Structure formats: C-alpha cells, structure tokens
Amino acid sequence: MAFPQNRILSGIQPTGNLHLGNYLGAIKNWVAMQNDYECLFCIVDLHAITVWPDLGDIAQSSREVAAGMIASGIDVNQSTVFIQSHVPAHAQLAWVFNCVARLGWLNRMTQFKDKAGKNKEKASSGLMVYPNLMAADILTYKASHVPTGEDQKQHLELARDIAQKFNVDTGKDVFPLPEPVIQGPGTRVMSLRDGQRKMSKSDISDMTRINMTDSSDVIADKIRRAKTDPDALPGSKDDLAGRPEANNLINIYAALSDRSVEDVIMEFSGQGFGALKPKLAELAVSVLGPIASRMSELLADPAELDRLLARGAEKATSLAEPVLAEAYEAIGFSPRA
Ligand code: AQP
C-alpha cells in the first residue's frame, strides 16, 4: 500500500500555560502548513503524565491548548485536532514499540537525561519510553512529515529507527520513515529571565514566559522586566554572539513581525533596550491580544470545545485503527473473529 506523501502529525502537551514559545515555535507554523499538508494536531495528554504525580488539571489544560490552536488559526474543519487519550491506538502501538525499540537506543536520548536530572532512579519508566509513544503518535497515521524543533530531532530519528526495525523484523512494509520539517526563525524562544534556557510551561517563575492568555498589561510588564545586558544593540548578527538575552528579544521581535533578524538589527542598531522593549511589547500585544480574546470566548463554552475534540478523535480513530490492525497482522497476532 502506498504511504501518504503529505501528512503531518504534531503534538503539544497539556502541561500548563501555553506560551509564546509554543506559539512561535509550533502553532504559528502549523497554521501556515494547513494549506500544504493534511494535518493532524494532537494534544498529547498521555505524554503529560510522564511527570507523575505532578499532574495539574489535564482536562482543563487540554481545552486551553485546543482553544489556543483554534484561536491562532487552526481550522478544525480542515485539520484534525484531537486528544491523544481519546484514540487508544496510540497507547496500543506504543506497547508494540516498547518491544521493538532497544534499551540502548533509549539510553542515548538526551531529553531523558535532561528531564530526569540527577535523580534518574526516581524518574517514571514512562519518561524513559516517552520516545516510543511519540513514535506511535507519528506512525499510527503513517505521517510523512513531522515539524521538529531542535529538541525533538533525536526522537524523530528514533521513530525512523523503530519503523525500519519493525518493517525488517516482520518482513512487511507497514510504516514509512517520516521526514522532519525544520522550522524557520523563532523556532527556539528563550526564557525572559535567562537567555540560555528555553521558555517553558513548567518553569516555576511566570515572569520567564509570556502566556498566550496574558493581558496586555502583563505582557508589557514582563517585557519591561526582561533580563538584558548593559550594551547598546549591535549592528550585525555576529555581534549578538555571547549576548543571549539581546539575541532572544531580537529573535522574538523578528518572528512576531515576520521579518528577518537582520532587518530588525538594522532598525535598532546602536540603540538601547529602552528603544526595543516598548516596541516589542506593542508588537506582542498586537499579535497575542486578539488570540487571547478568542481563546477566552472559546473557553467560555467548554461543551462546544469538547464536541469539536470528539469529532477530531473520531476522524483520527478512523485513520489510526486500520494501521494498528495492519501492524498486529504483521506481528502475527491472532485476528479477532
Ligand atoms: N521555548 C520554545 N521555543 C520554541 N518552541 C517551543 N516549544 C515549546 N517551547 C518552545 C514547542 O512547542 C511544541 C509543544 O511543546 P510541548 O508542550 O509538547 O513540550 P515542550 O517542548 O516540553 O514545551 P514546554 O513548554 O517546555 O513544556 P514543559 O514545560 O511541559 O516541558 C513543540 O513543538 C515544542 O518544540
């Protein structure tokens, strides 16, 4: 059977506040991809429990992620938006992949080492096998492409290794080898308090990130108080080396305004952060303000959001179940009468 040529799967964890990094690094690109690809966007709640027992309100966060996607321009009539746990094939195929992937492969995953930290023995086994579930997310739809930030490149490689090993071991060409779609500028948004750390939902300090639901005043305040350095803004990209906070603010400006970093550097060259910050705040409010208002309208009707997500899950299930059945058959499981 021919594999889909233009199918994208991407996901986002319902682990807390959606932020500017999620918007610029993922959602904004997804909106743009809708016309070129058949898109499946998954709210990966099964991944969110790998940090057990710090669970939070997963159901509410899932609705917020759905609202954030729709408010940003994901069209649920064109793309499939759904919650991972609503489509059992993800977990079922992940089990198969737990048996396909070798422990040595998982031991090389740098994200596990980062997330587990020094206390590896206390990390959940789910955190260790998380990349197998990610492989299942992708391969259960035979996705041809996966939008991939730097931090997920290694996991996509692993998904390809799993697909290949499954096909070779069973002698059946069940899974494609998905390709990365590397994203443009703004891919990596850093913390407003430390330009060397990623802006993150789970950072304990809210001042490190701009949440997609922040009010205009809060956005302006966070940008005003963002960490900077004492020098004037440089005249070339090379001069941003060793200046992570300046680099971050200029990158954010460029990504929000759809301009090149060089162009933004030209505009602010020789000026202080006092010139950049108010303009950046104004820009961020002009982009995120309408999204935040639409999100709050959507969140005011949770039943309607749940209905949209159920429809997405139905569509996703109809694609995933035949692939799971094909994989089971290739393994040689007894067919269900
Ligand atoms: N700071 C970021 N810059 C650019 N892109 C980012 N993404 C996340 N943070 C940034 C992208 O958003 C998508 C969804 O990410 P995720 O929620 O599945 O997990 P994450 O990458 O682990 O995001 P967080 O915010 O750091 O979550 P927590 O704190 O729960 O671990 C992905 O495409 C990701 O690249």
Image (cartoon, rainbow, N blue to C red):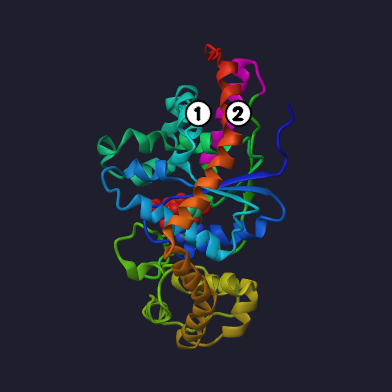
Residue 114 or residue 327, whichever sits in front: 327
Q: Are marks 1 and 2 in contact (CB under 8 Å)?
A: yes
Q: Quadrant of the N terminus?
A: top right
- Amino acid, disc 2: Val
Q: Is residue 229 above or below residue 42?
A: below
Which residue matches tag 2? 323
Give the mark nearest the N terminus, 1 or 2: 1
Q: Residue at x 52, y 35 (%)?
A: 135
Q: Can residue 130 be seen from the camera position used here?
A: yes
Q: CA distance from mark 1 to mark 2?
A: 9 Å
Dominant secondary structure of the residues highlighted in magenta in the image = helix
303 lies left or right of 8 = left
Position of residue 34 measured from the top left corner of the image (x, y, whole percent)? 66, 55
Neighbor class of circle 2 (other Cα within 10 Å; few <14, some 14-19, many 20+) is many
> Quarter-wise, where is residue 190 in the image?
bottom left
Q: Which residues are magenta?
A: 155-173
Give me the disc on residue 93.
1
